[in-house]
Image: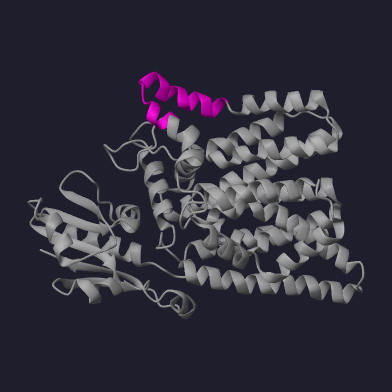
Amino acid sequence: MKKRWLIAIIVAYIVVRTYIATLSSYGFYHGWNEGYYSLIAKNYFSGSLWEQVAYPGGEPFSSAPPFFSYAVFASFKMFGISDLSARLVSILSEVIAVLGVYMLARELYNEKTASIAAVIFVFIPWDILWFGRAQTDPLMVALMTLAIALYVRAYKNDTSMLPFGITLGLAVFTKQPALAALPIVLIWSYFQGIKRKQIINAIICFFIGMVPLLVWLSYYAVSGNFTVIFNIIFGELAYRSEPFSDLSRVVLFTAAGISPLIIAAAAYQIFKEKDFKSILIIWLLAYGVFVLVRTPPSHEYYSLPLMAPVAIMAGAGIVRISGKLNRQVAVLLMGAVIISSISSAYILLSYSGDSGYTATKDVGGFLRDHMNKNPDNDYLVLVQMKYTPQIAWYSGLRFDGGSLIYSIGDNLSVEYVNGIIKNYDRKKVFLVSDIDKNGRSLTDYTKTYESRYEVDVMKLYNPGISGLAVLSVR
């Protein structure tokens, strides 16, 4: 495949994925992350760049370092404050990730394999889903993948490790699991034959790359907020979740997100190559164990870093198979891989709401407009916790001042809601809830507004998610 075709495919992908990003709002499937990081980036305009604060007066966010929220803030500066601007960070991160996949595949195999691996990576449904969402993992994966590629190139050619160190440092500054790249490359170096000078240089350059994170953490050390430091350093491994707490879902969702033909091509390459000292196998095994053990409940996107080695092995497998076929059949094989991936991506995008879910935006707009038309009332808005950042983002409501948002759990009942509102002296109370919960347990309240999301693919899996309703409680 010629480079101009590869570039054309990547550009076309960016255009199409950007369009898809305009079809949906921050929704029910991990839209919490998108809303929360967008609020953090928006608050940088009026607050401190040292602290990731989503709500004025709130505690600093300490689950992940700030590089992603900085990138979203920069995107807001360039393109304006919007959900599309936030999602552009992840969409453009795909370019960095594809570059890393291409470089690594070329170092390990050849130009042809590199081009095919890059195309496969673009079309993996799991990548299409997540590399269009405003959350940390796409940027972390992009930088982590590029860092591993830079290490392999530098190690094989005895060149500077500084690009590797800086890139990996930024990956860790995005999210802590990127640190796994360091043992991956060091184990691979051992099997390749130890180059003591290169390994020492790599470690030194890695610490140079960690300077931004260390400087950021020093702010909390000086201010005496050691909780943030502890959470950043130990939270992911020590207590974020119980081991194996998402085992079945992460395996099922990841396998479904890769598509059968890509899995088959990668498995064929592993079987034929039988090189268990390959950095791709080390990557799959080392990071795969982390994913199986440490993925928190419903956080299936933790497997996203595994897509790069899968894409490269699938690319090598297709090249190996194509060598036994005539040109026409080989082209048909590649076409079948792409078409099957697009079909799987359509199902994922439909299920996740990316193909048209706008309920959070619709409800947020309704609340904003209603309160602007009726400014004399003191409002209390009760929102299910999984929708709170999204509603805050689209409505402009805050956790302080005249209009108050209150996060509530999913097990709703009239008694539960009334027990909350009795503590607030507010003239008007709204409840934002999943539509299907209303008919079961909240019939005492009047439905004021609703926004539905009707997709047959999704409803076959989970008919309970079909939109949001605004109920008038008081």
Give residue 189's position: percent from left, percent from top: 79, 35
Determine if the magenta segment contains residue 212.
yes
Q: Residue at x 10, y 50 (%)?
A: 423
Q: Quadrant of the C terminus?
A: bottom left
Q: In the depicted view, which residue is nearer to us: 362 or 123?
A: 123
Secondary structure character of the magenta stretch overall: helix
Q: Please say whether residue 288 is visible from this viewpoint.
A: yes
Drawn side of residue 466 relative to residue 91, left or right: left
Determine if the magenta segment contains residue 134.
no
Q: Residue at x 39, y 54 (%)?
A: 32
Q: Residue at x 75, y 49 (%)?
A: 280
Above or below, 49 against 43 in this view is above
Drawn side of residue 370 relative to residue 266, left or right: left
Q: Please say whether residue 4 is visible from this viewpoint.
A: no
Q: How many marks?
A: 0
Give residue 103's position: percent from left, percent from top: 77, 46
Q: Quadrant of the N terminus?
A: bottom right
Above or below, 125 against 148 in this view is below
Residue 452 sits in quarter? bottom left
Residue 178 sits in quarter? top right
Give residue 362's position: percent from left, percent from top: 32, 66
Image color mode: one colour
Residue 326 sits in quarter? bottom right
Residue ranking furthest to the top:
222
Q: Residue at x 47, y 63 (%)?
A: 22
Give residue 242's position: percent from left, percent from top: 46, 48
Q: Which residues are magenta?
A: 211-229
